[in-house]
Amino acid sequence: MPEAAKNQKLRSVSRMKDIMTEYYIGAKTARETGKKVAWITSGGPVEPLLAMDVIPVYPENHGAMIGAAKMGADLCQTAESMGYPSDLCSYARADIGCAATSGGPIGGLPEPDMLVCCNNICGTVLKWYEIQARRFGVPLFVLDTPVCHRGFSPEAKGYVRSQIEDYIHFLESVLQRPFDLEKMRDVGRLSIEAQRLWQDVLLTLRHHPAPMSAFDAFFHLALIVTLRGTPIVIAYYQELLLELKERIAEGIGAVENERYRLLWDNLPVWYRTKWLSEKFASWNACLVADTYTSAWCSSLPYMDPDDFLGSMAEGYARIYLNLGIDAMADILMEMIDTYDVQGVVMHSNRSCKPYSFGQYDMASWIRQRRGIPVLLLDADMVDPRQFSEAQSEARIDAFMEMIVK
C-alpha cells in the first residue's frame, strides 16, 4: 500500500478562521451592540434575518465544532443524564448539553432572542427547538416544508409561500419594526451569488488531480452556512476560487499522486476527518465530491435573484434532504459522472436518520447502474462512542482493494 500523501494546506484556511472568530465574537457580544440573535436550523431561510439586521446562529454548525473539538461524548452524556436518549441526534444532544452547562469549544452559544426552525432537513429539529425555546423563554417560528418526492406542486408552493409571509410578520412582531424589503432584495442577490461561487468552488474538484478534497470542503462550507447573504462570503469564495485555479494550473492536488477518486455521502465524521483523510490518501485516493456540501448550492435552479422572496418557497423546500429517495439517487448518479468517481463511501450516520435511511437501496442502485463499489461506514457525526477505528480501517482497506484490482 502506498505511503500516505501530503495534503498541501490551502492559504485560505487562516482567513476562514479569522472570519469565523470575528463572527462568533460579534454574536457573543450582540447585546452590548444592541443587536438581536436568532438561533436557526442549518437549512432554514436566513436571508430575512439578515435583512432585519439580526445575527443568525446555527446550533448544528456549533455541533460540528463540538465534534471537531472532540467534546461530543461529554456533552452528549450530559444531555443523556437529563433524560434524553442516546438514539437522539448527536447535534441535538450536544446542543442541549452545551446550553445546560455553557460548555463546548466557545463556552456555549449566545442566548437567543428568537428561534427559527425549518423542517426541510429533519423532524428532530421541531422538538429540539421547542425545548430550547422553553429553556430561554423566547418565541419560536416553525416553517413547515412538505417532502418533494419528485416535484413541487402549485399547492405545496402556495402552502410554503404563505408561511414565508407569516415569517416576515413574526420578525416584525418580535423586532417591533417593519420588514425592510429593499435590504431583503440586496441580501437575496448576495445569497444567490454566494451559492453560485460555492458551486464553482466545488466544481474545481472535477479536475485531475483535485485541488482540494471533500474534507477541505467540509471546512470551507462554514461561511455559506452561517453568513450567506453577506458581502464577506462573496469576497472569501472569490479568493478561495482563485487559489484553487492557481493550484489547478500548477498541477497541485489535495492528494499527492492521486489515482482514485471517491464520493462521500452524508455528514462528516467530525472527530475523525483528519484520520479518514489520511487513511484514504494512503491509498492514493481522494474524496473529490460529497452530497453534504453540495446541498448548499442545490437550490440554485429554483432561486430568482429578481424575486428572492417569491422563489424562497421552492428553493428552501427542494433541498437534498427533503427529496424522495429516487430523486436523491439521481443526484448521486449525476455526481458520480460529473466528478469521474470510482467508488462511493456512505457514512451510515447513527444520528441522521433522514440522511441514512435508504442508503442500502442507493448502494445497490449505484452498483447496478454504475458498476462501482460502495462502502457503508458505521459512525456518528459528533458522538465518538459510535465509531470503531479498527472496524473502519478494515472496511476501508477491503473497499480500496476492490477498487485497486
Image (spheres, grey):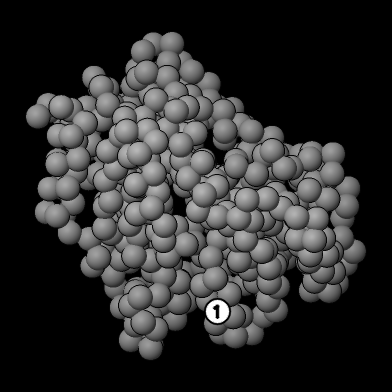
Q: Is residue 93 above or below residue 327?
A: below
Q: Residue at x 83, y 50 (%)?
A: 310
Q: Locate residue 151, reporting x and y percent.
A: 68, 50
**Does 140 sit left or right of 249 as displayed?**
right
Front in this rendered view, residue 133 or 261: 261
**Does 139 sit left or right of 294 as displayed?**
right
Q: Is residue 359 above or below residue 124?
A: above
Where, by quadrant of the figure, is residue 14 drawn?
A: top left
Amino acid type at circle 1 is Lys
Q: Locate residue 334, reporting x and y percent.
A: 49, 33
Pointer 1: what residue? 127
**Does 334 sit left or right of 251 as displayed?**
right
Q: Residue at x 28, y 51 (%)?
A: 376
Q: Residue at x 28, y 70 (%)?
A: 73
Instruction: Kindly give the residue lying farthest to the left in the view shown.
Output: 1
Q: Please identify the quadrant where the N terminus is shown.
A: top left
